[in-house]
Image: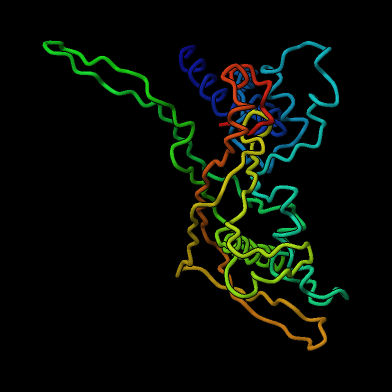
Amino acid sequence: MGFLSKTLSELAKDKIGGIPEPFRSGANDILTEAFPGLGPFSSASASNFGNRPTSALDRAGFENEISQFVLPDESTVGDNNSLEKSYDWRARLRPKNGGVAQLYRGAKLAGTDGAFADYLLAPIEASNGMIWQYTPQVFITSTADYHPHELVGSNYAIPSYIKTRGVDNNFPVTAPFTANNIYEARYLLAVMTFLKVVTKSYYGEDALNDADGDGFAKYGTPPPVLLFEYLGDHGFNKVPVVVVSYQIEYPDNVDYVPVVIGGGTESDETTTTYVPTETRIAVNLMPYYTPRKLRKKFTVDGIANGYNYKDGFL
């Protein structure tokens, strides 16, 4: 009977360890009351650090969970290191500060009286870039290239280092998007438009005109370099990227809801577009470092020690 009690107790501890912290103590009390003599069932060493979506992290529970990873040095605790700082853990793809006005110039073209203010990219501009609605799946691949030298009579090749590709070609960022209400449907349409815009260059007669009055025509300007941010300081910290390709699924087993754009203009014109209530979007990103930045900012020690984390190197 003692062996059975011990087995049941260990099994219960393991299961409770996967329960989110706010409910763990309650589950422990219920089991202790139901099976007296076998408790306590709570496992202090269990951590649910990776068991919840990033967007749902609560500050108090998160601080307790990662306290084991934080050096207990009071001198390092401050406005820049405290979890009370307003971190945004969501994945975001946004234009650089100098390209914000250019990317969202639809607002200027709408008219000086603010007519047709509900232009397609308005939700993206309001959220400071494209935000992934759910925690995305990201794959990073890096390769160190070696050339094997075959020696006569040798059983093994002698490798010579050639170069390292920090990130091979591009890395995909994939996640579902849903339209559970009017706002989400409107945002999904804005995401689809955003991906169209950031993969196109300026071309045609309109690009020969100085449409935004900055003294320069945009003809031949390539797609913009964007910044990808995700997971904090030592994750993807302002990584300069270009969108190489994207895939949007239009499934046949979901409902499609209408999104109405416009109204409030002189002609009171509106447009209607249907978007899926659930879809999956894959965006392939390629890091885009300038030769000067690679020459001036990149150091192996900087990556190892973390002190050049703001330079966006992967």
Position of residue 108 in the picture relative to residue 306 (left or right): right
**Quadrant the C terminus occupies:** top right
Residue at 65%, 74% in the rendered image: 206
Q: Nearer the viewer, residue 42 or 185?
A: 185
Image coords of residue 18 (percent x, y): 58, 30
Position of residue 4 in the picture relative to residue 83 (left or right): left
Q: Residue farthest to the bottom?
A: 267
Image coords of residue 213 (percent x, y): 79, 66
Q: Is residue 200 above or below residue 313?
A: below
Q: Is residue 5 above or below residue 178?
A: above
Q: Residue farthest to the left?
A: 153
Residue at 41%, 29% in the rendered image: 143
Q: Nearer the viewer, residue 109 or 188?
A: 109
Q: Is residue 45 above or below residue 244?
A: above
Residue at 67%, 81% in the rendered image: 271
Q: Nearer the viewer, residue 98 or 255?
A: 98
Q: Residue farthest to the right?
A: 113
Image coords of residue 98 (percent x, y): 74, 50
Q: Count the labels in the image.
A: 0
Q: Quadrant of residue 43?
A: top right
Q: Is residue 135 above or below residue 87?
A: below
Image coords of residue 44 (percent x, y): 65, 18
Q: Quadrant of residue 62?
A: top right
Q: Quadrant of residue 216?
A: bottom right
